Image (cartoon, rainbow, N blue to C red):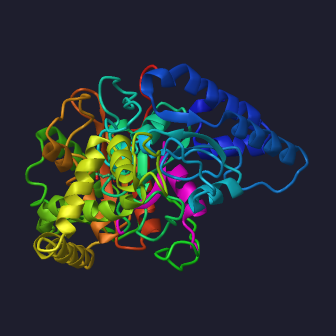
Amino acid sequence: MKDLHHLSARELNAAFLKGELSAVKIVETFLSRIEAHDKQIGAFLSTLAPRALLKAESLDKKRSQNLPLGKMAAIPVAIKDNMHIAEEITTCGSKFLTNYKAPFSATAVRLMEEEDAILIGKTNLDEFAMGSSNENSAFFPSKNPWDLSSVPGGSSGGSAAAVAARLSPIATGTDTGGSIRQPASLCGIVGFKPTYGRVSRYGLVAFGSSLDQIGPLTATVEDAALTMEVIGRNCPYDATSMDLPTESYPLSPQLEEGTVIGVPWKFLDQLKPEIKENFTQSIEVMKSLGAKIIEVDLDILKYSIAVYYIIATAEASTNLARFDGIRFGVRSKEAKNLEEIYEQSRKDGFGREVKKRIMLGTYVLSSGYQDAFYRKAQKVRTLIIDAFEKAFSNCDAVMMPVATSGAFKSGAIQDPVEMYLQDIFTVSANLAGLPAISVPSGYDSKGLPLGTQILGPQMCDVAVMQYAYCYEQASKHSRIPGGYE
Ligand code: GLN
């Protein structure tokens, strides 16, 4: 048998069910890998060793008594630290929330626990999930296991780094503008952003409520599918949760005959040569599987960054109003009256990027500017949705790169606009609520991973996963970074 940490989540589960591995052995192995490697990587903000071992022991007992076991039995899962686990601290990567103990678990977390997944730790993120590099975490930046001097992407960079270095077979992420797909691409793993409303946002600390989705980061498409079968459920506590039956994700390496893939070549005009070459190769793979490739017009996506950073900051400014040192957040000790408590606590508690976004969001919503910015952005958002609808009337899926480059060096991007432009290929799926996946597609000239992106119409999560599986099986780019084998 392969080394335990080389096994996919499905393989771990199968080995556990067959009695080849105990749940305790699985948990101990991953905890000791975290112990050995995470000082350099910084993927985890905390581990949940006692809780994980207790759960593992109970699973071993259940198995020995032949009691029924859940779909994710004995699979360790790392949780991005903006999702609640009952009785554990949720920091959101912010100093402000270091005292916040969650009174309940997020629905997605609860569903995985009910299916006997083992929660192993909480992963690092850009503060309140705002960022593309993990450099905005208030605690420490996560590093890319492929090159410790490069970023793992963001904001779910801790989760992506954890899976890439096999410190956990599965991690959850959240994607408001690309935060699952971009770090997955930069770390050489799979990241899936479901249709808006497919996974409950209950128990996720809100950033941009009309954009946020929880989804899996995994080493294989099969593991992403397995996670979606568990967390893709209707939930009464989230008003935007879709009232649809839970789906299963049957995967076949054969692409369905007549599949048409749309590529927005004109919009992709400015790609760096090595990204273009890598992307063209991934299109060739789909062609070799029998897909018909057509050009679709998504030129409007050139406005998507402007639209996203107006809508996301507007929503963030209202969502983050609850962190005031009274209802939530560490209260400033120096403040002498109520006004000062609000002011000082927010000043001390929030980092620079978060403050900037609250100010920007407040500005675009303020009277006199609302029409010029916020409402206009909403109108362009509708045009983006329409453009996708039109594209999908001619094709089954759209493909584009995930990121404008492979992982960049820590500290290399200082200009905020340059950083925001990193999200040019990802934010549109959030604006239009579409399912989209990042799958490893090869390496850049520095040997760092790249990903390709497949997007589908709303609710076509199963189809997107299936296309990604075909691509993955035909291309087989994923491997473990050197030093972590
Ligand atoms: N990088 C984007 C931002 O900073 C996306 C973040 C996310 O998806 N959480 O807003």
Residue found at the far right of this picture: 65
Q: Position of 121 compared to 190: left or right?
A: right
Q: Quadrant of residue 390?
A: bottom left
The residue sitting at 12% across, 61% down in the picture is: 302
Q: Is 470 or 45 nearer to us in this picture? A: 45
303 on left or right of 138: left
Task: Report the quarter where the N terminus lies.
Answer: top right
In percent of width and height, residue 121 lies at: 58, 39
Residue 232 on the magenta segment = yes
Q: At 38% from the left edge and 69% from the top edge, which residue is drawn?
A: 257
Say above or below: 228 vs 64: below
The answer to whether any part of residue 398 appears in the image is no
Residue 120 position, x and y percent, is 62, 39
Boundaries of the magenta span: 210-235
Depicted 395 relative to depicted 427: above or below: below
Considering every residue shown, the one lying at the far front of the view is 336
Would residue 178 be counted in the magenta stretch?
no
Count of marks overlaid on the render: 0
Out of 78 and 388, give the one closest to the viewer.
78
Q: Position of residue 335 (x, y in %)?
A: 39, 45
Determine the image quadrant of residue 78: top right
95 with respect to 306 (left or right): right
- Side (left or right) of 201 relative to 29: left
Give the residue at x 80% y 39%: 57
Residue 70 in picture, x, y percent from top left: 73, 56
Residue 239 visible in the snapshot: yes
